[in-house]
Every structure is written in C-alpha cells, then in structure tokens.
C-alpha cells in the first residue's frame, strides 16, 4: 500500500490508519541530502533533504469473526525537509513510540515521533508505503530469513501453481501442510513447507510459506521464512519463490527492514545486494 500525505486531510487519514504508530518501534532512520552543481558558482548547493523512517507496529482489528492482530511495517518518506532533529541521549531509546503528534500548517507537515521530540521532522510532503501481515509484529528469530510480498490486487494462487512454477525453473518440490494447534488467524488461507526434492532428508531444508487473504483493503500476501538461509538448496529455493511471486504480481516487498516496490526489489534481487537480507544481521 502506498499513500501520499500532502494536506491536513491526508495527515488525519495517516494518524487514523496507523493510530499514531502507538506501541510501535522505529527500526531504521535514513537521512539523504541531495546536492546539485551550480555551474555559475562552480560549487555544489543543497537541493533538498529526504528523511525515511521504517516503523514496525501492530493493531488489534475487530471483525465479525472476532479480535485479531495485524502486523505492519511502514516506510514513511518525508520530502522537502526544512528542519529535523534526531537525538538520543545515552541510556535512552527513541525507537519505542509512545505516541505520534503531527500537524499541517503554513504548507508544511510537522511530525513528533515520541513525547519528548527526539525524532522531529518538518517537511513539505510525505509518503507512506506499508506491508501488512496477520499476527504480531515481533522481530524474527536470530538466524532466520524472512521475505514478504503484499499484492496490490488479484487472487491468491493455490499451492499447485507454485509447485508448477518451481518445476518450470528446475526446482521440483514437495508440499507439507502445516497444522496449527490453535485457531488460525482469519486472514490465513494456507500454510506449510516447500521442500526441494533433492533435499528431502535434510532436517532444516525447505521454506516455510504462509499465504493470507486481503488485509487493509489490499490483495493477498505471501510470507517466506527459512532457518537455513545459507544452505545452497534452500537459498536457491528462496530466491526462486520470491522471484516467481514478484514477477507475476504487482505489489510491495518487505525484506528484513526494507520496504520496497516490486520493481525495485527485482532490480537488486541477489541477497546482500539490495534484495533481502537476514534481519538478525541488522
């Protein structure tokens, strides 16, 4: 999901949609200063500042089927930044968000991402890109690699479609359905393990796949997880599954803490080169 934030109405939508990111965590902050060459003066001049904050949070959602959690990872890009403060005292942690304050005035947007203002930004406009998943927003265990794709539109393909696609790229796999002991999240459609035929005896081989239906009004979602990301067979399967999903559907990818458009991910799909990375190494 992508949404532009330019007006007071947009800002009200953002705070309502995210509930002010309450209880969330800022996992990454990036500051990019753009410069242009002034040929007349023979020197570079500042042409703007962009600040990007990646925020992981979750919301309880009440539906007819009961109360359940939706985990979200948002990339909030603030453009045309005219003033900002990123301040963290020794022993303090500004990454935990108690509440977010925001206002639109005089053609500017102002954000305070905590009660004391350690992360504060004034900008011309902003944009939010977000990936939603069923369940909690807790960080993945150390040593595990995770990749999520949220389609903009379309129907969730069945397991058989993925098996057929993997056959076509030369990675035949077997499917093992995962049975949960507790009631599943209402958005969950199917879940299990894809195991390469060549590695059926390896205890950690394969990729755990979780497929779910629409969340936040978007299309379906796919999450891939593996506890053996460096095994040759598993790594190849993970790359193939992500590539098959991203090439056949339009949407947004979440790789570690990076939220990116499908084309952006495909342009650097090799691990460690702009594709996904093991979140435990962040």
Image (tube, rainbow, N blue to C red):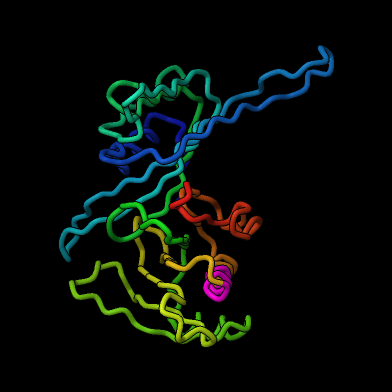
Residue 156 lies in what quarter of the image? bottom left
Whether residue 132 is situated above or below residue 25 in the rendered picture: below
Whether residue 161 is situated above or below residue 214 in the rendered picture: below
Whether residue 244 is situated above or below residue 258 in the rendered picture: below
Name which residue lies at 30% across and 41% down. Answer: 24
Residue at the top extreme, as displayed? 41
**In the depicted view, which residue is nearer to us: 176 or 120?**
176
Residue 21 lies in what quarter of the image? top left
Q: Is residue 245 visible?
A: no
Residue 98's spot in the image, x, y percent?
Answer: 25, 33
Name which residue lies at 40% across and 36% down. Answer: 10
Name which residue lies at 51% across and 59% down. Answer: 251
Indicate yes or no whether the magenta region holds residue 237: yes
Residue 211's spot in the image, x, y percent?
Answer: 38, 71
Relative to 179, is 197 on the left or the right?
right
User: Is the magenta region chiefly helix, strand or loop?
Assistant: helix
Indicate yes or no whether the magenta region holds residue 156: no
Relative to 47, is 112 on the left or the right?
left
Residue 97's spot in the image, x, y percent?
Answer: 30, 34
Q: Is residue 172 visible?
A: yes
Task: Give the total number of marks visible in the rendering.
Answer: 0
Residues shaded magenta: 232-240
Name which residue lies at 39% across and 26% down. Answer: 119
Residue 165's spot in the image, x, y percent?
Answer: 56, 81
**In the depicted view, which residue is nearer to us: 79 or 11?**
79
Residue at the front extreme, as displayed? 202
């Amino acid at each position: 999901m992508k949404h532009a934030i330019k007006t007071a109405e947009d800002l009200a939508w953002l705070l309502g949609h995210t509930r002010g990111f309450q209880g969330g965590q800022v996992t990454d902050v990036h500051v990019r200063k753009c410069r242009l060459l002034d040929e007349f003066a023979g020197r570079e001049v500042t042409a703007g500042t962009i600040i990007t904050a990646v925020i992981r949070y979750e919301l309880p959602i009440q539906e007819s089927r009961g109360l359940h959690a939706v985990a979200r990872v948002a990339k909030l890009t603030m453009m045309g930044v005219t003033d900002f403060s990123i301040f963290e005292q020794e022993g303090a942690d500004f990454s935990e968000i108690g509440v977010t304050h925001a206002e639109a005035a005089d053609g500017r947007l102002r954000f305070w991402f905590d009660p004391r203002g350690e992360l504060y930004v004034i900008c011309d406009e902003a944009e939010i890109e977000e990936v939603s998943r069923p369940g909690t927003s807790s960080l993945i265990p150390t040593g595990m690699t995770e990749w999520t794709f949220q389609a903009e539109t379309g129907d969730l393909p069945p397991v058989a479609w993925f098996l057929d696609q993997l056959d076509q790229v030369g990675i035949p796999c077997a499917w093992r359905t995962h049975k949960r002991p507790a009631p599943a999240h209402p958005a969950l459609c199917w879940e299990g393990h894809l195991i390469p035929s060549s590695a059926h005896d390896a205890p950690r081989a394969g990729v755990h796949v979780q497929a779910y239906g629409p969340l936040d009004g978007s299309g379906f979602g796919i999450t891939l997880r593996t506890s053996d990301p460096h095994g040759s067979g598993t790594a190849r399967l993970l790359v193939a599954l992500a590539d098959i999903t991203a090439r056949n559907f339009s949407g947004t990818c979440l790789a570690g803490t990076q939220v990116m458009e499908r084309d952006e991910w495909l342009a650097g799909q090799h691990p460690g080169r702009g594709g996904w990375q093991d979140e435990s190494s962040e």
